[in-house]
Amino acid sequence: MTGLSNSHPLSFLKAITLQSSESDIEIKVIIPLLKVLGYGDEDWRSQARFAKIKLDFLVHPNELFTTCLPYLVIEVKAANKNIDSAVWQINNYMRQSRATLGLLTNGYRFRLLYNHQGQVVTIFNYSQAELISQFSLFYKILCKETCLKVGNAVLQSQNNINLQFLNHIAKAFANEDMFGLFKKNSDSNSEPKPESSAVNSQKRKSMIITVFNNKGGVGKTTLTINLAATLTQLGKKVLLVDIDAQANLSTGLGVDPLNDVELAGRKDITHLLTEPKTKLEDVIYQKRWNDIELDVVPSHIRLSRMESRLTQMVDSDRVLAKKLKNNEYDFVFIDPPPSFGKVNGISLMASSGILIPTQLSPYPVHALEYVIAQAQEIEEFKGEPLPILGVAISMYDQRSTNFNISMTELAKKILAKHSGVREVDLFPENTWIPRLNIVSQCPEQGYPLHQAEFDTNLSSQEREAAQKALEKYENLASYLMSVV
């Protein structure tokens, strides 16, 4: 690597090439890195066995008791390997070892992960250049000094808990009051005071997005589900509203309109739209898959018979907008049918922006001009801006290079011609969702793509494909947040 002086603590990075094997990376990068971070040879083990797994490196300084959980595990790949395909592997290692931090690297990219009660999140994903420029922060997190501080703090906390427990036991036997063992005192251990009503009454500003294309079969619902799930991993609170009578979004999230809604006597989108007293919270179903948590308003086939009823209702165009007002979510995604019916107008009237998913094929690309025209009509009727946030590409076939180029050029011409005063762009290529079977299979099983990591029925090839697609969804979510 050029531009790195011999005096720099990371100068050893110059010793590797794209041909370096996994063993080379271990010897020429990881071991020197551990020394720079202050660890001695006795503070780490290579090829360490932990239960049924084998860790490339387990970092656990001698000064810490063996009962302390590992601070850091490291997974190493060859220089020419894409480390993103091994994220779920190190996630699993961190969960099983209960390590606080995990480092995944091929010597050119460095991905640091944090484990909070089994939920593993990425702290940063650095290139070599970024690691060098941010090394002081990297050092503070991973150095032995920090490791010992964290380990000792955890140990002290555990000792305090044990002392409190012994104190409770002593009092319990002395007072023969076993049921009072764990009652909290009215001192500093009491429950925190509830927030004031003024704080509770404040609602966050929500971005309500209709994901809309009047051409079906472009992966609209699948993109909506996985984009929403990715945003939750980035710390956002997300609500999904299914306003399509086919209820594909509902079933894709594991909500059965018959068993979970109708036969259970619960409410859905039809009640929200047609019953004035039905509130948003009355129709929300909470779904959770490990570290993914989504709220969903499900749909029902009965919605297909309500066109005339909705048309006759007073101010029905704004009914959903009123019900979504002052909600508690960062993002609300509305999934309407691929048409220009009544519910589409209701969806767009409730929205603060439109995301257009499309496939790089003639019919979906030509449909863009009709979506733009519909958006402009709604905007005029609404009397306030209804921006098109951009065009997201789904079901992208990387093999059809020349065809993709021609379709991309056509899409850009259509957008330039019909977008009016506001420019509408295709989202960048690193956000384009590939055409992969696993992407469409997951909603059929009733879960987002992220849950593929935990589906033991999937093959290793299917899991690798899922990781490849998730990398694009992460890019898409990050880009969308920058746009809004």
Image (cartoon, grey):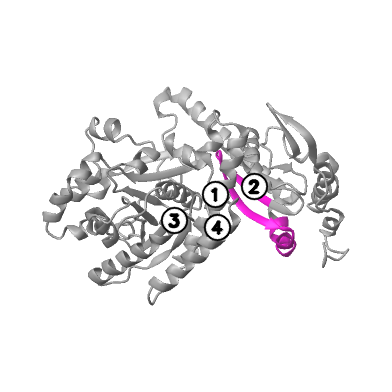
Going from N to C along the chain, the mark reached first, 2 or 4, is: 2
Vertical arrangement, residue 468 with respect to residue 158, above or below: below
| Magenta-tinted stretch | 111-139
Residue tagged by mark 1?
A: 434
| Residue under numbered circle 2 | 84
Q: Earlier in the sequence, mark 4 or mark 1?
A: 4
Residue most toward the right?
6
Q: Name the front one of labels 4 and 1.
A: 4
| Circle 4 residue | 404
How far is disc 4 from disc 3 in space, using C-alphas? 12 Å
Instruction: Please name the amino acid that badge 2 sits on.
Output: Asp
Locate residue 275 relative to residue 448 in the image: left or right.
Answer: left
Q: Are marks 2 and 1 in contact (CB under 8 Å)?
A: no
| Amino acid type, mark 4 | Asn
The residue where tag 3 is placed is: 358
Gap between marks 3 and 1 measured at Cα = 12 Å
| Dot 3 and dot 1 residues touching (CB under 8 Å) | no
Where residue 213 sits, quadrant-wise, is bottom left
